[in-house]
Each structure stands twice: as C-alpha cells, then as structure tokens.
C-alpha cells in the first residue's frame, strides 16, 4: 500500500479515532517512558550532549508535524496520517500514538550514533570521486528506512492514509528527510544555533499545544 485509497473504510476508521481516550490505556505506557528516560540519562551521564541535541531536534520537528497534521484534520476532516485507538495504549494527537511518539523521541539519537565519530568522513571515496558525506548518507538512509516501514504500517489497521496523493514518496520527501536533517546536522552547529533552534521549535510546540488542545482544535 504505497498511497491512501480514499476508501470509505479508511475514512470511517479515521472518524472513529478519539484522541486522548483512556479506554485502551495499559502499563506499556510507563515501561516505554522509563526506557526513554534511561536512554537520555545514560547519554547525559556520558556528557554526550550532541546526541541529546540530536534526539530533541528530531523529536521537536516531529511534534510540529503532528500538530500540523491534526490541524489539517480539523480543517479538511481527514489528516494526512492517523493512528487507530485499538492499536495503542494512548492516542496523543490524531496521527501519533504514545508508542510512535516514544520511538521518535529516540530516533534522532539512533541516527546520530550511527555516524562515525569523525563526521567529516565520506563513504565510497574512490579516485576522483570524493565520496558521499556520512551525514548525508545517514540522513538519506534513515529517511528511506522509515518511509519503507511506514508503507508496512499503512497496510495494517493501526496506521491510516486516506488521501490518494499521500503515501510513501511524499512522506519520504516532506517528512522524514526534514526529521533526519535536524538529527544529523543540528548537533554539529554552533551552541548558539542549537539553542536558538531548540528554543524556537519547542517553544512553538508548547505554545500550539497549550492553545489548540483546550480550544478543541487538535
């Protein structure tokens, strides 16, 4: 399933979603949160601040996308992507479950740690070919991997695409590429840039959630 099929079944599945409903809550919620805390605390103990910046950079961009997706659902009735209540312990916004959110909270750390210690390394350098920068290679490969996995998710009842123009290629280009650009490029920027980036992204996220959730927009 490479694109949404605009079917009545998909539309009905989206219409049945109730964000922040507690009926399916279970203790995996706590277990996943503990794992994420452990990962971040371990990186902090090792003073691996760049990995933490990578994690928060991707996670913040992820939240901006989820907020935008929920706003799209409010305006045009259907979001670009959605998660079913039955597939999760908790739906945070119409397009993101607790389990997905916890995965994205550490995805940036994973991508950052996949790169060699020397971030100037270029892969496949031969002769006059200067090779592919490891940052670009990591960004591209992780984006392809996540887009491919989303194709699998969209074939299950857990994850829903409705629009026939939205699917594997658009999500790869417009969603995962920006996610992993944030994860692999922001940590090597100056401390001032990192602070401005994280403050801007997370400030916008907190402001939007604080305003839009009480208003019933998302």
Image (cartoon, rainbow, N blue to C red):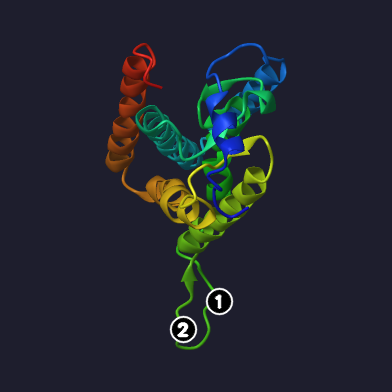
Q: Residues within 10 Å of mark 2 (few under 14, many from 20)?
A: few
Label 2 to label 1, Cα distance in Å? 8 Å
Q: Which element is circle 2 on?
A: loop
200 sits left or right of 35 in the view: left
Q: Position of residue 36 (x, y in %)?
A: 61, 28
Name the image quarter holding residue 210: top left
Q: Residues within 10 Å of mark 1 (few under 14, many from 20)?
A: few
Q: Position of residue 125 (x, y in %)?
A: 52, 79
Judging depth in this view, the residue of 201 and 109 nearest the camera is 201
Residue 34 in view (yes/no):
yes
Q: Residue at x 61, y 20 (%)?
A: 90
Q: Which residue is mark 2?
A: 129
Name the image quarter holding residue 194: top left
Q: Please, is residue 78 above or below residue 171 in the view?
A: above
Q: State the count of labels.
A: 2
Q: Position of residue 161 (x, y in %)?
A: 54, 42
Q: Position of residue 180 (x, y in %)?
A: 47, 49
Name the image quarter holding residue 128: bottom left
135 sits left or right of 147 in the view: left
Earlier in the chain: of badge 2 and badge 1, it is 1
Q: Residue at x 51, y 35 (%)?
A: 47
Q: Which mark is residue 124?
A: 1
Instruction: Point out the image quarter for the C terminus.
Output: top left
Judging depth in this view, the residue of 94 and 6 nearest the camera is 6
Q: Is label 2 in contact with label 1 (beta carbons under 8 Å)?
A: yes
Residue 116 in view (yes/no):
no
Q: Residue at x 65, y 21 (%)?
A: 34
Q: Which element is circle 1 on?
A: loop
Q: Please, is residue 168 above or below residue 206 in the view?
A: below
Q: Which mark is residue 15?
A: none
């Amino acid at each position: 399933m490479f694109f949404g099929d605009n079917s009545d079944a998909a539309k009905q599945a989206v219409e049945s979603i109730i964000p922040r409903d507690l009926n399916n809550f279970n203790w995996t919620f706590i277990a996943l949160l503990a794992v994420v805390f452990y990962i971040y605390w371990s990186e902090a103990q090792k003073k691996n601040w760049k990995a933490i910046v990578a994690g928060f950079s991707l996670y913040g961009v992820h939240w901006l996308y989820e907020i935008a997706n929920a706003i799209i659902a409010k305006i045009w009735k259907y979001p670009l992507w959605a998660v079913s209540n039955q597939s999760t312990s908790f739906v945070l916004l119409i397009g993101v479950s607790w389990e997905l959110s916890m995965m994205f909270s550490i995805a940036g750390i994973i991508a950052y740690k996949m790169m060699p210690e020397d971030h100037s390394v270029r892969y496949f350098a031969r002769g006059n070919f200067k090779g592919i920068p490891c940052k670009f290679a990591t960004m591209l490969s992780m984006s392809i991997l996540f887009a491919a996995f989303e194709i699998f998710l969209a074939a299950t009842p857990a994850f829903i695409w409705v629009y026939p123009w939205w699917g594997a290629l658009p999500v790869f280009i417009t969603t995962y590429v920006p996610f992993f650009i944030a994860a692999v490029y922001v940590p090597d920027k100056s401390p001032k840039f990192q602070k401005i980036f994280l403050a801007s992204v997370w400030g916008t996220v907190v402001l939007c959630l604080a305003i839009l959730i009480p208003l019933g927009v998302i």
